[in-house]
Amino acid sequence: MSSPAVRTLATPASSAAPVRAARPAEHFGELDVLRGLAAVAVMLFHYTARYAEVYGFPTPLPFHVGFGHYGVELFFGISGFVILMTLQRTRSASHFLVSRFSRLYPAYWAALLLTFTVMTLVPLPGREVHVGQLLVNFTMWQELLGVKHIDHVYWSLQLELIFYVWMFGAYLTGQLSRVRLWVALWLGVSVVVAGGSALLGRDAPYLPSKLLLLPYAALFSVGLVTYDAMQRRTVDALDVLLVAGAVLCAGLWHGPGGAAACAVTAAVFALFATRRLTWLRFGPLVWLGSISYTLYLVHQNIGYAVIDTALRHGAPPLLAVVVAIVVTLSLAAAISRWIERPAMAWIRGRWSKRRSATAPNPRSEG
């Protein structure tokens, strides 16, 4: 008998297919749009509140987007949803690895080289770069290797990679069907470490917290729980408890603002899961979603350099910010069109051809 707490989600009938069954991948365009909006929020935060804090404007801007940095929290939630979905649909371990590499690295390398060049030509205090730093940054693991990011926005990419490693391990060991159990354990460890550190008046241990993603377990968990609920086409008491635990966890690590950001992220996912965000799929927002990754990669240091240059040439602060927005949107679109998408298609195409060439021919097998 089903629990009275169970509620049916407005998901298509295909969602009820077996988790590992081969089926055409459904694309959720709303998530792309949400990524785009999150990237814009982070960009506006950096160009207004953060630039004013670090470098200052000669006269105050008419507005600050102080909450924009919470866009990264939405990124993490979306990653939780998308990576679980991708692994449950993937054809093989190598398919997942190739798809993630082709998605992340070509655009990242292009943005890295561009940012390094701009920071060399237009150096900013505290953002000096050198060739050795650049070489280590090519790995995307620079923080764990003790090397500064060429652009500090890269900090979140390493966390994404660590999350991929854990999820890939769950895939290889057949644990994806037990995702809620692992989310409960993950949130429990995160709450204990955050609460214990607060009671003892100490910082949480850096490396274990980083490798276990404890400060951001809440956000990834919201995405994981949402996709799992959509697969089951129900929301039950355990789902509600896990989301509530995620909000508590976020609050322990990041204070009231973190708890609020997690709650808003969960609310956005609830709207998405019940098909209440389909109205987001229209022209300009879809375009923003298509360049969200490259926009995130190029916006901060390059945008700061544009603002600094414009201010030094007498531009009013608001105009300097607008110019930076136009420049970074243009760069993001160019990298997406001429590097990200062609490289992704080429890498995946080469891998598919090689895989087809090495696959056994059924006609030659007795």
Image (spheres, rainbow, N blue to C red):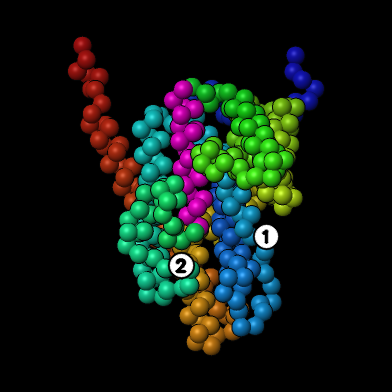
State the residue at coordinates (62%, 25%).
181
Q: Amino acid at mark 2?
A: Arg
Task: Report crowding for label 2: few under 14, some 14 to 19, many 20 or more residues within 10 A (C-alpha).
Answer: some
Q: Amino acid at mark 1?
A: Phe
State the residue at coordinates (32%, 62%).
131
- Asked if residue 15 is positioned above or below residue 135 in the image, the reply reads above
**Towards the viewer: 278 or 207:** 207
* Residue 168 in view of the camera: yes
Residue 17, given in percent of the width and then of the height, sits at 55, 24
- Compared across the picture, whether 150 is left or right of 14 comes to left
Residue 353, given in percent of the width and then of the height, sits at 26, 37
Q: Quadrant of the C terminus?
A: top left
Residue 195, given in percent of the width and then of the height, sits at 70, 39
Q: Is residue 158 magenta?
A: yes
Residue 67 circle label: 1
Q: Quadrant of residue 348?
A: top left
**Towards the viewer: 132 or 169:** 132
**Towards the viewer: 326 or 70:** 70
Q: Secondary structure at mark 1?
A: loop
Return the residue found at the far top. Answer: 366
Residue 127 circle label: 2
User: What span is colored magenta in the figure?
Assistant: 153-173
Upstream in sequence: badge 1 or badge 2: 1
Residue 323, given in percent of the width and then of the height, sits at 52, 76
Q: Quadrant of the N terminus?
A: top right
